[in-house]
Amino acid sequence: MMAADTACSETVMPTRKHIYIVYTGGTIGMVPTSRGLQPQAGWLEQKLRSLPEFTRAEMPEFTLHEYQPLLDSSDMSPQHWGQIAADILANYSRYDGFVVLHGTDTMAYTASALSFMLADLGKPVIVTGAQIPLGELRSDGHDNLLNALYVAAYHPCAEVGLLFHHRLLRGNRSTKVNSRGFNAFASPACDPLLTLGIDVQRRCPPWQALHSRTPEWQPLQPQRVAVLTLYPGMDFRLLQTLLEQPLDGLIVQTFGAGNGPQQPQLLDALAAATERGTVIVNHSQCQQGGVSMGAYAGSHALAQAGLVAAADMTLEATLTKLHVLLSRSGDRTQVITAARRLLPRALCGELTEAGDE
Ligand code: ASP
């Protein structure tokens, strides 16, 4: 990894940059309708072009690609993550950076997915949106988008970031924590990349250096992945029913440092699914600290049943990483073995490896 100073430059205004905006939907461009807020085709670009601050000489130029249909991000699926990644790749050499406008509800999933799909990214990709539509009084979309364009052009970090409420978070470390506040996102286990006050300040070195090579494309194939949260008093027949389905991957949300009840009904069902080739991940319900397999007998038993540790990854990062790893081409047994090996290892800053703390 190159030194932080080179990788995340804090330059005085150079030549005017050009940013490509991928507009997928979300509150930022929504208007009130009789059925609640909904995106309206064509509205956002017209609005932006009418706001003088977006076209000031100090700002980068932008080209906006509006998707059809525009979506509430609750409707986003892995297929849409693939569409956004392919769009960025197709335009990669023509622009200095990329901004993805997206609903906040599943923004952290898309940011995480893009970080794994665009391996060896050398230009900034910044995902942002708003809690209040741009057309309404007190919209946070104005500052979020203005800052995203400015940072992508003049303080670029070579990775996928999520910009919200004056902070650029590492995309695959972010999670939505507030459905009504402007401070909607947190990065519980990693400092922000940048904080935006009077000065733009770097808090955490970017994942890698800026470069102009085209990123490696990690496409997605449909995967049957489920998430199961453990809770006291759970009837393990529920798990058995779930595991009767043909699952490629299962994320088990465990207690504390990755512990589960030492019940044969649970452990036998998990071990049998591991045997059948399901990749099962031990993900902690805690937001910080992550999983320490083997620290307690409760996690040792899960390790014996074949679970692999999600370390301190967010659920969003764990789920999208699982999708990307299981989508690799090649012999299925080898793909499964590689997924189990790589899940606990950092691919692009998504987890803290032992010794990194
Ligand atoms: N439901 C909206 C969405 O995720 C919420 C938002 O954008 O803030 O698309």
Image: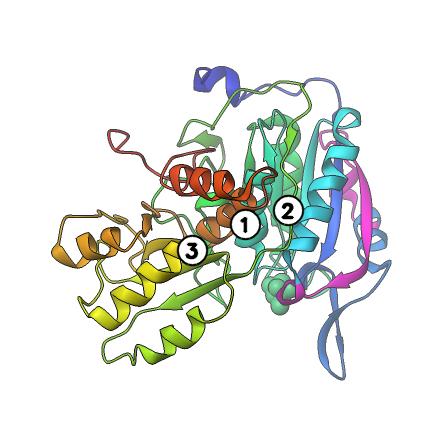
Q: Is residue 334 above or below residue 94?
A: below
| Residue at mark 2 to residue at mark 1: CA–CA distance | 7 Å
Image mark for residue 155: none
> According to the image, label 2 marks what residue?
220
> According to the image, label 3 marks what residue?
315
In the image shown, does 255 or 327 lie closer to the viewer?
327
- Closer to the chain start, of discs 3 and 2, is 2
Q: Is residue 171 above or below residue 29?
A: above
Taking the spot 22% from the left edge, 63% from the top edge, the residue there is: 260
| Residue 71 x/y as whole percent | 72, 63
Image mark for residue 323: 1
Name the quadrant of the C terminus. Answer: top left
| Residue 167 x/y as whole percent | 48, 43
Q: Secondary structure at mark 1?
A: helix
Taking the spot 55% from the left edge, 60% from the top edge, the residue there is: 224
Q: Secondary structure at mark 2?
A: loop
> Residue 123 sits in which quadrant?
top right
Q: Amino acid at mark 3?
A: Leu
Q: Amino acid at mark 2?
A: Leu
Whether residue 148 is visible, yes or no, is yes
In the image shown, does 100 or 200 lie closer to the viewer?
100
Magenta region? 50-75
In the image shown, does 118 or 270 lie closer to the viewer?
270
Mark closer to the observer (3, 2): 2
